[in-house]
Image (spheres, grey):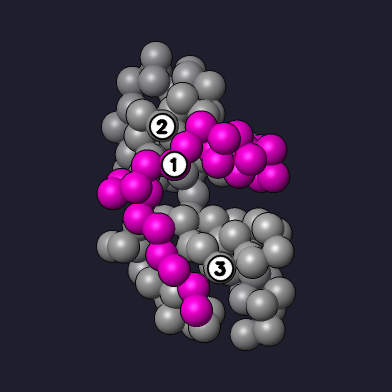
Amino acid sequence: MHIYGLKACDNCRAAVKALDGAVLVDIREAPLQAAQIQAFYAAFGEALINRRSTTWRNLTDDERALEPAALIAAHPTVMKRPVIEATDGALTLGWTAEVRAGYGL
């Protein structure tokens, strides 16, 4: 199981701690491949972009107008996190009570 996020993110750290065998992939240190970004966007649509983040608020209008894949490639911290990829390839977004329940927590 892979958890895509940031090592400084509280939700990402909580997910890693709660999910046995999960590996955190820090998207600053290991940038996502274009195919991964596209797969995440296909699964979550606009919800993948965190429009309440500090990163989003600091973007210019031109940067905000970028396609989501280009935006996340240029500014990985604008991605809502964590994105959890289960061993069967299933994807979940965030660390909400609903997501935790889906993992039996």
Residue 61 position, x and y percent, is: 39, 17
Element assignment for label 2: helix
What label does residue 48 carry, if any?
Answer: none
Instruction: Name the residue located 47 percent from the left edge and 37 percent from the top edge.
Output: 33
Residue 31 position, x and y percent, is: 37, 42
Residue 75 position, x and y percent, is: 35, 34
Q: Which amino acid does label 2 sit on?
A: Ala
Is the C-beta separation of discs 1 and 2 under 8 Å? yes
Q: Name the residue under label 3.
A: 1
Residue 3 position, x and y percent, is: 49, 62
Tell me which corner region of the image, top left, top right, bottom left or bottom right, holds residue 77.
Answer: top left
In the rendered image, the quadrant that contains the N terminus is bottom right
Marks 3, 2: nearer the viewer: 3
Q: Name the residue under label 2.
A: 73
Instruction: Name the residue located 34 percent from the left edge and 47 percent from the top edge.
Output: 30
Residue extent of the magenta highlight:
21-45
- Front-most of 52 and 38? 38
Q: Does the stretch in magenta take in 101?
A: no
Tell me which corner region of the image, top left, top right, bottom left or bottom right, holds residue 42.
Answer: top right
Q: Which amino acid does label 3 sit on?
A: Met
Q: What residue type is labelled 1?
A: Leu
Element assignment for label 1: loop
What label does residue 32 carry, if any?
Answer: 1
N-terminal label among 1 and 3:
3
Q: How crowded is mark 2: few (under 14 residues within 10 Å), some or many (20 or more)?
A: some
Is the C-beta separation of discs 3 and 2 under 8 Å? no
Question: Label 1 vs label 2: CA separation?
Answer: 7 Å
- Front-most of 87 and 54? 87
Q: Does the stretch in magenta take in 38?
A: yes
Tell me which corner region of the image, top left, top right, bottom left or bottom right, holds residue 37.
Answer: top right
